[in-house]
């Protein structure tokens, strides 16, 4: 693990108003902290534990906090009003927030102070306010601010930090008496600055609202604890890779926007300002990473401005800091080893080490011990372990795979072309994928085959393709396809299934010789169909790419292992609760869409098709749940179609299946206990038990023990 140590910070600020000779202001990016709020957490011995803080609730802005943010907006208007002009326009200003109510409302309040409606924009003379949109991303998708959730690498690194001697010497031992005292009195574990920071905010939020802190806090609150808790930014920036996660994506965005403004490529062209509504950590991490000293914790309503200026045909960055909610002037910050007005190119050189080389997903999921990507697709005795599969990489479509999906699109065009018509429109078709690279690219390829551009939609005669948007949700938020991650209930059930006698008799004992042989030869634990399923795909992918398989696989590959591994769909659908998670949300979506089409409430009204780009298990689980027999594993390029048909003013469902990548036609499927086609109302009755009564999140976090033993007979 590489570390960057900043054990002493250079004093780097001077009080200064904006002088007249600083050059022309070109673009600004302003990071600010939300306003005063109520507490989010109580500590075990908190005398105010249970207080509701009505009408605010927990973690929300108070009236004082709202006014503070509004005043920050007025402060920014005084500072930048001449530059931004009187009228607000969406193209001029962009504002982004973290996914917290207090930061999103703070963003609105700052904009209200910065852009009161001019006469031409006054829509209600009794309410001198104008709505301004605020963008944000869900916390688990955050890609500009630091990641608070869904970042395993950061979590592991911070958990491990306290074990390093350097951390003990610089952050913990100098204040160990304070840590011990607070831990004993509060009932909270106190091991690192992060713990002290959380406790400090509980005291401060309660104190700000008039709730008196306990007597035992007088020896350290507010000054001493704020000073020690304020070391959290240097502490959490101690590991270089974590520092990049904390500030690198924000800094990269700021510098990229500056470059685009200079090059005339910024969109919209009249963009003048970016505003970022965040937290004390947003500012604290940035000051720490830039090696600029700070005292304690950035207060409510503080703001850090990155100004791009032009003077004598050269571009400079100036940093300005509003250090309190009552400040009337800005502090001019100086980046160490650079002038007050730092030439842009010098600034970029000095901060290059902070910029990311990985996407935020890659950075958050990198291997903590080694900083490299996992080789989970190989088995211990794999002769090709370490092969890069250049230029594809791991788990990506090959050229053959791409052509196969394109051909699937052409197959669908031959089948449904008359129904869709020649022209693609977004209203007609919706496509959703799982959040895996190969399914998202498969979706694009199927659409390319299904909807080549018609004459009127041909934008490049040398490239007969048209872009079609593909929707998806992050794996941890999946609510239509089966959840691959962030589903503890599913994980616990699958882990426990092998202990049931019924599972042993039906899935394991009949093939135990194969399990044992593969385990001995591959070095992998092979206990259940799920294990064999994963191993099968390693063999198949290598085989498909021309890598000769070990001789010991000849006795079972491909036919026997494919057949046994194919039982994974029935195995993982064995418990009703799992079956609902695996197929219920998809089936519910399909049936709801059919109902809306019948009732003419579907939006858009011209919607004709929904496409879902998934995996072999997406189809396998559905076959299993519908009690339709299947043989082995569903191949690449297979497709299951649910058709809503109308005949004699009645509606029916027809199930059709493309069983191989070379198939020229669909196979008609029969749902047990229903005609072909199946009357829509009969289909709903027969599948009602598969539909969820809980949200996907609730289902994934339900108590496993409460249904343990509820095995089907």
Image: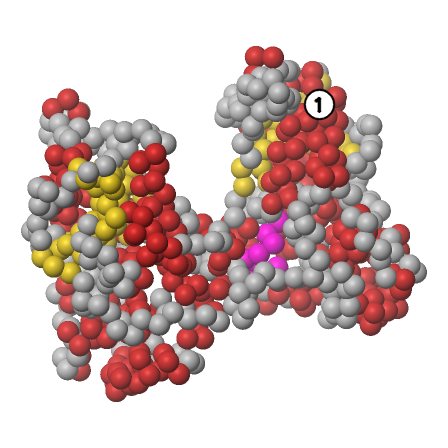
In magenta stretch: residue 45: no
Q: In percent of the image, x 40 and y 46: which residue is there?
A: 137
**In this view, 630 is above or below 193:** above
Quadrant in the picture for the C terminus: bottom right
Residues rendered magenta in the picture: 481-490
Q: Is residue 108 left or right of residue 462?
A: left
Task: Tell me where residue 676 sits by quadrant.
Answer: top right
SS assignment at label 1:
helix
Instruction: Say which residue label 1 marks.
Output: 413
Residue 631 at x, y = what percent? 84, 47
Residue toward you, 123 or 360: 360
Residue sitting at the far front = 312
Residue 502 at x, y = what percent? 79, 65
Residue toward you, 338 or 379: 338
Q: Can residue 588 be seen at all in this image of the molecule?
A: no
Residue 616 at x, y = what percent? 72, 46
Q: Mark 1 packing: few (<14 Cα in 10 Å), some, or many (20+)?
A: many
Magenta stretch, overall SS: loop
Q: In percent of the image, x 43 and y 81: which residue is there?
A: 163
Residue toward you, 396 or 192: 396
Q: Is residue 393 left or right of residue 181?
A: right
**In this view, 142 is above or below 551:** above
Q: Is residue 402 left or right of residue 221?
A: right
């Amino acid at each position: 693990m590489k570390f960057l140590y900043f054990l002493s910070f250079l004093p780097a600020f001077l009080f200064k108003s904006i002088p007249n000779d600083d050059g022309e202001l070109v673009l600004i990016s302003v990071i600010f902290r939300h306003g005063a709020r109520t507490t989010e957490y109580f500590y075990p011995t908190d005398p105010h534990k249970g207080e509701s803080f009505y009408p605010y609730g927990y973690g929300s802005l108070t009236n004082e906090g709202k006014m503070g943010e509004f005043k920050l907006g007025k402060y920014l208007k005084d500072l930048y009003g001449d530059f931004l002009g009187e009228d607000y326009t969406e193209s001029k200003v962009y504002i982004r927030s973290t996914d917290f109510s207090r930061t999103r409302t703070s963003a609105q309040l700052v904009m209200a102070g910065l852009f009161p409606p001019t006469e031409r924009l006054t829509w209600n003379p009794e309410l001198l306010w104008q709505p301004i949109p605020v963008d944000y991303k869900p916390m688990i998708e955050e890609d500009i601010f630091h990641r608070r959730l869904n970042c395993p690498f950061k979590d592991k690194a911070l958990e491990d930090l306290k074990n390093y001697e350097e951390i003990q010497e610089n952050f913990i031992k100098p204040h160990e008496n304070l840590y011990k005292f607070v831990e004993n009195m509060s009932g909270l574990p106190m091991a690192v600055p992060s713990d002290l920071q959380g406790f400090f905010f509980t005291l401060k939020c309660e104190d700000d609202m008039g709730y008196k802190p306990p007597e035992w806090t007088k020896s350290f609150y507010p000054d001493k604890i704020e000073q020690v808790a304020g070391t959290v930014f240097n502490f959490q920036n101690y590991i270089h890779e974590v520092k990049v996660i904390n500030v690198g994506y924000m800094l990269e965005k700021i510098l990229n926007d500056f470059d685009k403004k200079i090059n005339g490529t910024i969109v919209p062209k009249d963009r003048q300002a970016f505003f970022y509504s965040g937290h004390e950590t947003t500012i604290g991490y940035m000051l720490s990473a830039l090696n600029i000293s700070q005292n304690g914790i950035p207060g409510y309503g503080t703001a850090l401005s990155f100004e791009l200026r032009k003077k004598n045909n050269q571009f400079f960055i100036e940093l300005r800091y509003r250090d309190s909610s009552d400040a009337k002037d800005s502090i001019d910050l100086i980046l160490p080893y650079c002038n007050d007005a730092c030439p842009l190119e010098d600034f970029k050189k000095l901060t290059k080490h902070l910029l990311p080389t990985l996407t935020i997903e890659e950075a958050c999921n990198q291997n903590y011990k080694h900083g490299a990507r996992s080789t989970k697709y190989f088995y211990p005795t794999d002769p090709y372990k370490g092969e890069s599969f250049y230029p594809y990489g791991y788990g990506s479509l090959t050229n053959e795979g791409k052509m196969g999906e394109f051909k699937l699109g052409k197959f669908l065009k031959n089948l449904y072309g008359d129904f869709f018509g020649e022209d693609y429109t977004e209203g007609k078709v919706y496509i959703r994928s799982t959040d895996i690279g190969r399914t998202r690219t498969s979706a694009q390829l199927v659409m390319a085959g299904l909807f080549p551009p018609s004459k009127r939609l041909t934008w490049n005669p040398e490239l007969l393709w048209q872009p079609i948007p593909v929707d998806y949700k992050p794996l941890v938020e999946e609510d239509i396809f089966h959840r691959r991650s962030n589903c503890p209930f599913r994980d616990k059930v699958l882990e426990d299934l092998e202990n049931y006698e019924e599972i042993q008799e039906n899935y394991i004992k009949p093939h135990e010789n194969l399990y044992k042989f593969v385990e001995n030869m591959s070095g992998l634990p092979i206990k259940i169909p799920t294990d064999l399923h994963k191993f099968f795909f390693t063999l198949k992918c290598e085989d498909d790419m021309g890598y000769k398989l070990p001789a010991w696989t000849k006795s079972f590959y491909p036919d026997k292992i494919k057949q046994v591994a194919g039982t994974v769909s029935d195995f993982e659908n064995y418990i009703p609760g799992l079956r609902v998670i695996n197929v219920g949300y998809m089936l519910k979506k399909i049936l709801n869409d059919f109902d809306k089409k019948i009732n003419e409430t579907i939006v858009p009204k011209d919607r004709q098709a929904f496409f879902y780009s998934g995996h072999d298990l997406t189809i396998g689980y559905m076959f299993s749940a519908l009690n339709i027999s299947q043989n082995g594993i569903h191949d690449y390029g297979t497709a299951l179609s649910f058709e809503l048909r109308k005949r004699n003013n009645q509606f029916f469902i027809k199930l059709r299946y493309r069983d191989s990548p070379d198939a020229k036609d669909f196979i008609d499927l029969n749902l047990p206990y229903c005609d072909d086609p199946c009357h829509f109302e009969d289909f709903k009755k027969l599948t009602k038990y598969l539909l969820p009564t809980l949200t996907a999140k609730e289902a994934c976090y339900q108590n496993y023990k409460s249904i343990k033993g509820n095995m089907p007979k």
